[in-house]
Amino acid sequence: MPHFEIKLLEGKTEGQKQKLAEEVIKAAQSVIGFGDESYSVAIKDYSLQQWKEDIYPKHIQAEEERLYKKPGYTM
């Protein structure tokens, strides 16, 4: 049962978040299968300051070996 946790800079609308969740599920279904009932998606907003102090160093840099797509930016 796939569960996706998306960390996102604050400022996106609820509609954008809903569409993102739907598109993530569609993409995953096309690759790994499963029906809609098998998926869940959580989205958490972060300020730029939180991103710089927490997300980037602890969840991106520190887990670089697990990243399937690395960012094209540094902080």
Image (spheres, helix red, strand yellow):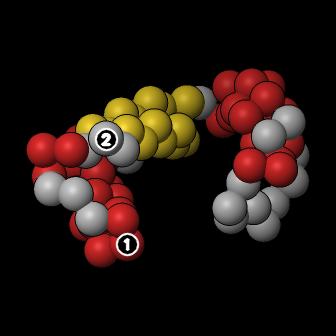
Amino acid type of the residue tagged 1 in the rendering: Val
Q: Which element carries disc 2, helix, strand or loop?
A: loop
Mark 1 is surrounded, within 10 Å at the Cα level, by few (under 14), some (14 to 19) or many (20 or more) other residues, namely few
Foreground residue, 75 or 34?
Answer: 34
Residue under the image location 41 percent in, 42 percent down: 4
Residue under the image location 13 percent in, 44 percent down: 37
x and y, in percent, of residue 27 in the image = 34, 69
x and y, in percent, of residue 44 in the image = 44, 30
Q: Which element carries disc 1, helix, strand or loop?
A: helix
Q: Quadrant of the N terminus?
A: top left
Foreground residue, 32 or 53?
Answer: 32
Total count of labels: 2
The residue under label 2 is 1
The residue under label 1 is 31
Foreground residue, 27 or 57?
Answer: 27
Task: Of the two numbered discs 1 and 2 on the same chain, state the one appearing first in sequence.
Answer: 2
Residue 36 vs 51, above or below: the answer is below
Using the rendered view, name the quadrant where residue 70 is placed.
bottom right
